[in-house]
Image (cartoon, rainbow, N blue to C red):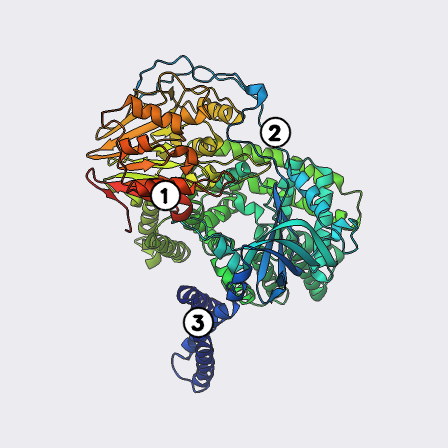
Amino acid sequence: MPPFVLITGAFALGIGLSELCKSSSWVWAVIATAVFLLVGGIWAYVQGKRYSFLWLPLCFLCLGYAWMEIDRVSFPQQLNPFLGHYVQIEGVVERLPSVYPNRFVVVLDNSAVCLGKEKWQGSGKIQVVYYIPEGSADEDTVPQELAGKSLGSGLSPTVKIDVGSRKSEFGRMQQEPSPVYLFSNGAARAALASTAKAGTGSKGAQATALMPGAVVRVEGFLDLVPAPLSPGEFDYRHYLERRGIIAQVKAEGYPEIKAQGQGLSSFWAALRLRIVDGINSSLPEEESLFLQGLLLGSKEGMTPDDRDLYQKTGVMHLFAVSGLHLGFVFIALMAAAGSLGLKRLPTFILVTAGLWGYAALIDFTSPVTRAAVMATVGLAAYLWQERRNAINSLALAALVLLLLNPAVLFDPGFQLSFVATWGIIYLAVPLNRHLPLREGWREALTVPAAAQLAILPLTAIYFQRVAVLGILANVLVIPLAGLVVYLGLAGMLLAIAAPGIFNPFFLAAGALSLPIKGLLRLLAGVLGASFLVPPPPLWLCLLWFALLVVLGWALREGFAVSFPHFRYRSRASYWVMPSFIVFVCLLFLLCTGIWAGNSGKLEITFLNVGQGDAILVKTPSGRTMLVDAGGSPVYAGSSFDPGRQIVVPALARAGIRKLDLVVNSHPHEDHLGGVPAVLDNIQVGRYIAPPQEHTTPLVLKVQELLEEKKIPVSYVKTGAEINLDSNVKISVLGPPQTLFSGTRSDANNNSLVLHITYGKVSILLTGDLEQEGMLDLVSRFQGSNGIQADLLKCPHHGSSYSICPEFAAAIKPQLVVISVGRNSFGHPDAQTIRFWQEQGARVLRTDEDGHITILTDGANLIMPGT
């Protein structure tokens, strides 16, 4: 085994053990053990003892553990008194700000935090977030130009809906303009430039105001990033901790620049800004962001739709500058060295300087650093005619990165980059040898195939998606992407060295984004191009990689020789077909996600989507219904989409690729906002909504998607029944036959109300009903058990308008769930929580309890884990 593979593997294992144990009290004992093992190993080697080679990896295992503990940054308890207060912070800008459509983020190192006369200073970085002033749409606001347009009117008052039916109940929809956002990404950059001011008070020299190394003073509210509440939820706090960030400040006012940034970091940042300015001045915004992503790895401006497109087609790696990009740089530099007639040492200096200069422009991200280390080692071996071992170089690159930052081991980008490179090194050559294609076509197919096969389990874990057409997409797109990179590199050099003549190169490179995106959209539209999958279990991932190793070995070592009277086959060749068959079976398992299973009970899951509703209903037979999909008031330029970022991943983790029914209780943003993402990513059998006159751009977008995907639609009122499962009765109790008019919120009171009964257990989902709607339910079902429920979804996020004693007396719930998040409406009202508790009900909240799953066997309510 190559030496660096053994050493790096042991070092990484030590880091993993440290993350598992998280105990810094053992650090010095572990370091002492590592020293003992190192000395013992040297002695054993000198004495010629057997197994002396085992001492070194054991030493590095201990060093990995200790290195992770020493590097670990946790929140200092001395900062506790500062949390939640308006503080003043002075620190050093670590890197260029990350600019998003509605905010920009600055990371400060060597920070000092002041609160009155109290001061804290210590290790750990602080993330400063500046939100660009934004306009918001009130939840009851309808654009004037859209007012008065009706939706779903003229329906029969009593309807019975069969989910299996494909009949649609509405005609062709009208097309309306898309919503206009107040802040584009360009406006965000302008806001960033106008936010910083020099220490003298002037607003000049904006280009260098927030350079790395600048000393900045900011003011704002200091707080911790919220910890995840639900299984599978992205742990943003842990993500920041791994980068040494201990807290976050929501800043107000202008950052005061105490000293300008200097040094190498500032130099490379200035070059990067010059390139970005050149790209921005040459291209429209969409093409500019594409080119910045491809050349510089900038993903902040990437739209959610584009991100989905790249993930579905398996080409997201193009926007993580890595070996592909450095390969193009390497070829260009080697050609330049050859044309200049340079000898070995000048060639090595020129090429490595170019490679590491490009890596510095990309801020030494994991993929580009890995590629630069491997290219440097490989070039040295080639020029000085030493034996090369690509796997050994890969392990050395990993060791370098882990020494610089051991926590990078848990970064998805690090894992995907190294595993993809391992796949290319280990699998591409043997695959290439066995494919009956012309030489050029073989390389074009085997390299992306090897990379995609290697990272498949990781993409399933991190993105809950398998890109079936990823290999084809890469084969078609990489040649075009290579041309974009070459043109872009030429433009970058000219933007730095000869401003004014770079424009044609950036224009040509940006123009190529159109056919690239067109090809990707064509492939993404193919049925079965990608699958949403639940994260695979550990055993499946380990078996997958074990089979890759066996398959690669069998293809590499397997051969057959034919003689006149017999045919000889090597032992390895007998493993090719069995390993391939098992491999295909594993691929089938991975794509189907059958391990997700079914509980055999009625499951109700209230998803934590922030300030909004999203409720997943799964029947004992496995039929599914989603009631609302979250959302939030429309903030200008905000890219947060609960449907895309919370609901769809939650469905994927549950193994749900098809929803039999999607229900919208009413067309407010916090209930409907995530529906487009669901319709885009999940197969839907039928869509149900109340017949409300509330036409907005969001409603029109949903209608357009429903028509495009030919999803049957039903608008219903009280009296309708939904046939989802023969053992589960779903009755529509609201809105009434005559819709509310003139109440505080007609849209809320006309919410779709569902009463679900399974055995002796009943559930009431109320949308955003307010007092008028609740009293109407009580009056219409008085004296019957039509609205009694063991489990109640609290109306209107627990607002003060949801208190109704008559309604509570008729319902008599055991359990009340409030779907709520951080908001400016005062939800949930303290009186509402106290009211339901006084009724004897247990109250749960998604903002405190995360995703809330309730199961019932038809006799009792069951909460897993309680």
* Residue 61 numbered tag: 3
Locate residue 221 relative to residue 239 in the image: left or right. right
Instruction: Determine if residue 270 is in view.
Output: yes
Sequence-first disc among 1 and 2: 2
Residue depth check, mark 1 versus mark 3: number of the one nearer the observer? 1
User: Please, is residue 619 above or below residue 261 in the view?
Assistant: above
* Residue 373 numbered tag: none
Which residue is at 31% across, 16% downward? 158
Residue 521 image offset from top left, x and y in percent: 52, 33
Q: Residue under circle 2?
A: 180
Residue 220 image offset from top left, x and y in percent: 61, 52
| Mark 3 residue element | helix
Mark 1–mark 2 distance (CA, rounded to whole Å): 42 Å
| Mark 1 residue element | helix
User: Please, is residue 448 above or below residue 623 in the view?
Assistant: below
Sequence-first disc among 2 and 3: 3
- Kindly identify the amino acid type of the residue bearing the numbered disc 3: Leu
User: Please, is residue 739 above or below residue 562 in the view?
Assistant: above
Sequence-first disc among 1 and 3: 3
Mark 2–mark 3 distance (CA, rounded to whole Å): 55 Å
Front position in the image: 778 or 31: 778
- Kindly identify the amino acid type of the residue bearing the numbered disc 2: Val
| Mark 2 residue element | loop
Q: Residue under circle 1?
A: 834
Quarter of the view holding residue 545: bottom left
Quarter of the N terminus within the rendering: bottom left
Residue depth check, mark 1 versus mark 2: number of the one nearer the observer? 1
